[in-house]
Image: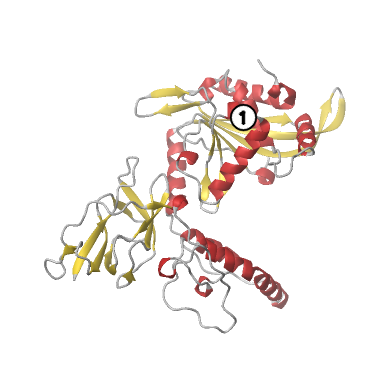
Amino acid sequence: MTRYVFKMPDLGEGTVEAEIVAWHVKVGEHVEEDQVMAEVMTEKAAVEVPAPVTGRVVSIAGGPGDMIRVGAELIVFETESSEAEPLSQAGEVGPGPAEGPAPIPRDQEPAPAPRATSPAPAGEVKRAGRVMASPASRRRAKEAGLDLAQVGGSGPGGRITRGDLEAALSGAAAPAAQAATATKRAAAPGLARRTGTEEVKVIGVRRVIANRMTDAKRNIPHFAYVEEVDVTELESLRQHLNGRLQKGAAPLTYLPFLIAALARVLEDYPQCNAWFDTERNVVVRHRPLHAGVATQTPDGLKVPVVRHAEALTIWELAEEIKRVSETARSGKATREELSGSTITVTSLGKLGGIVSTPIINAPEMAIIGVNKAIDRPVVMNGAITVRRIMNLSSSFDHRFVDGYDAAAMIQALKDMLEHPATIFMAG
């Protein structure tokens, strides 16, 4: 028998370490070559790491949340392969290769064809051993009340794939709903004390978000500016255009109009469409508008990018916003689709509230927050009338964007949204 030492591979783009998000194998377990053995995460993306050889797991380094440096020992196998490092002494592991096979990014992993699966009938014994599934699959199953031990996995070593989970959820939806209804009926009304606590380890995407938000708030002096916008005319135009939608076309929300207006306005306020390069101490102003669209996903907040928004029509903007947002939510977004924005727009839709204080997406200079639009009584020409009002809550990097310029930019944006025809006028 020989041993094979697999070290944390170089995941590119200057990565020096990666965080262990989940182990899908354990010490003593037999693992097949190319079987997904771990999920790790860099500052850029989550990566599933396949086993480089077939063999038995001798040891693993760290647990979920631990950081492992590139080139450090990650996992040791005992194998019969002649390619593995020979065992020099009992309990002693010789030097292994500096890098293993290239890891497969989660959004590029070739998904095996899903097979029909369904929850086990009542009374059926659950399968023994560890259930192998990604953190996203575990989270979704938990939210749906589905026991993964009752789902058959078609992936390597019985791993539950996304297709397996989708098939199980579709089969379990009706019984789960019936069971939930029965539980509600059976529950006796009354009040009861709740006790206990729950500890949730901050790992993966949530750790990256926490670190970036902390750095942004610590290093960037935020200047907040809130202005209300009368979107009555814009709402009328939006409804008119949506009433003429072609089949399959993305409906128009306020975001395409807002981004189209930004593309025009930012020509006069280039310091708001810029990055601050901390290493070179240089402000980089961008001529194109690469609009970041803050999107809530099962893995946390992500910012996919609509590139060259200045060159897209309202319809093209709506389609691209829809595409990049759905790609981010499904976990299929590439690194390029999640980086390179020059200014970010964030919206909570119907949950938008009256005012928000968005945090700048460094190294950008500004972020525009869209609050909900509601009908309010306002005074126009000396009479009270009902208008549709929406607040814009913005934040700017006060080191490089003066308060006057920030306010002037938002006022220009307000003027264009209140007179939407000007969004489409040249010059």
Where residue 324 appears, as percent x and y from the top left, is 56, 42
Vertically, is 313 above or below 5?
A: above
- Colouring scheme applied when the structure was drawn: secondary structure
- Going 56% across and 71% down the picture, which residue do you hit? 117
Q: Is residue 289 left or right of residue 283?
A: right
User: Which of the 4 image quarters holds residue 370?
Assistant: top right
Q: Is residue 317 left or right of residue 213?
A: right
Quadrant of the drawing holding the N terminus: bottom left
In front of the other: 310 or 365:
310
Where residue 191 appears, as percent x and y from the top left, is 67, 71
Where residue 175 appears, as percent x and y from the top left, is 66, 73
Vertically, is 346 above or below 398?
A: below
Residue marked by disc 1: 312
Q: Is residue 129 left or right of residue 395?
A: left
Vertically, is 300 above or below 262?
A: below
Outermost top residue:
427
Vertically, is 253 above or below 308?
A: below
In front of the other: 109 or 385:
109
- Going 59% across and 82% down the picture, which residue do you hit? 122
Quadrant of the drawing holding the C terminus: top right
Q: What amino acid type should be assigned to the residue bearing mark 1?
A: Leu
- The answer to whether residue 369 shows anywhere in this view is yes
Q: Which class describes the residues within 10 Å of circle 1: few (<14), some (14-19), or many (20+)?
A: some
Q: Regarding mark 1 in the picture, which secondary structure is present there?
A: loop
- Going 33% across and 64% down the picture, which residue do you hit? 33
Where residue 378 appears, as percent x and y from the top left, is 81, 31
Q: Is residue 19 left or right of residue 320?
A: left
